[in-house]
Amino acid sequence: MNTVTRTAVAAVAAVAVATPVVAATAGDQAAGRHSGADRPVAARPSGPDPSLFRDRTPNPWFPLRPGTRWVLHGTEEGHRLHERTTVTHRTRRVAGVRTRVVRDVVRRADGSIAELTRDWYAADERGRVWYFGEATATYRRDGSVIDREGSWEAGRGGGVAGVIMPAHPRVTDAFRQEYDRGNAEDQAWVVERGVDVSTPAVSTQHGLRTLEWTRLEPRVVSTKLYVRGVGIVMERDLSGGHERYELVRFHRP
């Protein structure tokens, strides 16, 4: 772990119980402003204005083109896992916004499904990608459902959409990715640009690193690496957990 990341982890640990959300007024949100249009704007309690999504700008750090696929191999608590994420052709209207359905399947080494999730994302006119919720379930090896913990939807039961990726992420940008009090409260912080990245699928010196944490698990801090034009290429726990994934195959339609 480099000096930048060590410092950031220490800072996150110190403030994990707080809520470092980028504030925005109603006027900022409607106009897409926050000290410059490219900064992430956190959702107000009512969520983002659906008018922001009439014209959409793709985000190269978080592609949502239907048919895009990622395959990651990883481990969690010593178990080998295989994750396949697909941007589907399906859409779903959530909180007044037509979102793109992204299907994520995690399988065990024996091929059985460990987790199945459908996420709902939408890019706005500025290119920020918003996260509108997920329907998720974990499974036993026999295919029976263990639980659906973590499922949430913006506009229902207090759920509020958050920014999953700014249009032009800058170091020190901090943003709430999701909000459903007591159930889904992930937050992220951009901590480094120009990161060396090497996985079986991609190699570059221009990666983007974020740190993520949640008030619900204050001891867990994880990092994700993104590559422009690809998206997530690596994720791992830095403290409080033992999860690690890296991209092994990528398909851009």
Image (spheres, rainbow, N blue to C red):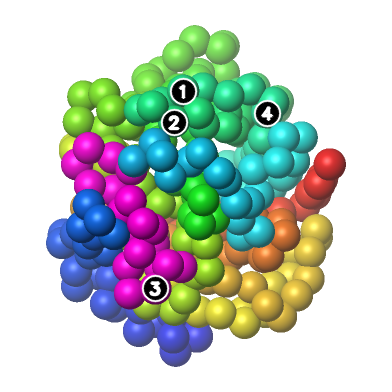
Q: CA distance from mark 1 to mark 3?
A: 29 Å
Quadrant showing the C terminus: top right
Amino acid tagged 1: Arg
Along the line of sight, which residue is nearer the eye, 151 or 217? 151
| Residue stretch in magenta | 29-48
Amino acid tagged 3: Gly
Q: Are marks 1 and 3 in contact (CB under 8 Å)?
A: no
Q: CA distance from mark 2 to mark 1?
A: 5 Å
Mark nearest the camera among 4 and 2 is 2
Q: CA distance from mark 1 to mark 4?
A: 14 Å
Q: Which comes sooner in the sequence, label 2 or label 3?
A: 3
Q: Which comes sooner in the sequence, label 1 or label 4?
A: 4
Q: Which residue is mark 3?
A: 36
Q: Which comes sooner in the sequence, label 4 or label 3?
A: 3
Q: Which residue is located at x 32 percent, y 31 percent?
A: 154
Q: Which residue is mark 2?
A: 97
Q: Examine the rendering and report whether any part of residue 64 can be seen.
A: yes
Apparent side of residue 149 relative to residue 114 in the rendered image (left or right): left
Q: Tell me, for residue 93, which label it has, or none.
A: 1
Along the line of sight, which residue is nearer the eye, 199 or 109? 199
Apparent side of residue 79 relative to residue 237 in the rendered image (left or right): right
